[in-house]
Image (cartoon, rainbow, N blue to C red):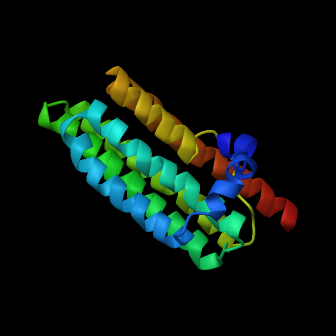
Amino acid sequence: MLSEKFGHALDRPLKSFAKRIPLSPNVISITGFTLTVVSSFVLAQSLTLGAFCLLPAALLDMLDGIVARSKGESSSFGAFLDSVLDRYSDSVILLAIAWNLGSVGHMTGVFLALSTLIGSLIISYARARAEGLGVSCSHGLMERPERLILLFIGAVSGYMVMILWVLAGLTHFTVLQRILYAKKQFKSAA
């Protein structure tokens, strides 16, 4: 949803800055992922501190694509690598949240974090599978930016479990949206 509306909105204002970055987009992606993993260890101990530690990683995750487009270095492999690292990042973040909640005995929170993780992975899989069959399927309410923003809000506000209830429901709702959208696209293509 946010990606559709604001997808490349920062490309123009950051273009001259992005061109001067001496790193390749893939190095930026890997660096961002590494920061996510390190920050997730903090997140497992303190949701608030961990959320703020994740901000530089989120900025790098956004910057890799801007650098690639600004320098004319976009590639299929870079897009693939970025997508794979995004799935790993989502996984370590949600596992860290589950660990944090489990350490204080909040087993409902652990279940919700794992349910959100499953929904997040299936959202991406549904898109990839549909596209592998020749149908575009980026449709849906709860894409990655929305999920990360809500997780950040949950972590800093102290309402993580409430946010996870919302995310667990809406990630699986988004999977259903993609299934129905893909079904419609397959019917119209037949």
Residue 165 percent coordinates (x, y): 40, 29
Residue 110 percent coordinates (x, y): 25, 39
Q: Is residue 140 visible?
A: no
Q: Which residue corresponds to the image point at 42% horizontal and 42% vertical from the top-left?
A: 55
In the displayed structure, 35 sits above or below 171; it is: below
Which quadrant of the figure has residue 103? top left
Residue 24 percent coordinates (x, y): 54, 72
In the displayed structure, 167 sits above or below 136; it is: above
Q: Quadrant of the N terminus?
A: top right
Q: In the visual, does 111 lie left or right of 129?
A: left
Q: Nearer the viewer, residue 152 or 165?
A: 152
Q: Nearer the viewer, residue 176 or 55?
A: 55
Q: Nearer the viewer, residue 109 or 42?
A: 42
Q: Quadrant of the C terminus?
A: bottom right
Q: Which residue corresponds to the image point at 58% horizontal and 78% vertical from the top-left?
A: 77
Q: In the visual, does 137 lie left or right of 79?
A: right
Q: In the visual, does 114 lie left or right of 70?
A: left
Q: Is residue 29 visible?
A: yes
Which quadrant of the figure has residue 128? bottom right
Number of marks drawn: 0
In the displayed structure, 100 sits above or below 30; it is: above
Residue 164 percent coordinates (x, y): 39, 32
Q: In the visual, does 134 lie left or right of 188?
A: left
Q: Which residue corresponds to the image point at 49% horizontal and 54% vertical from the top-left?
A: 60
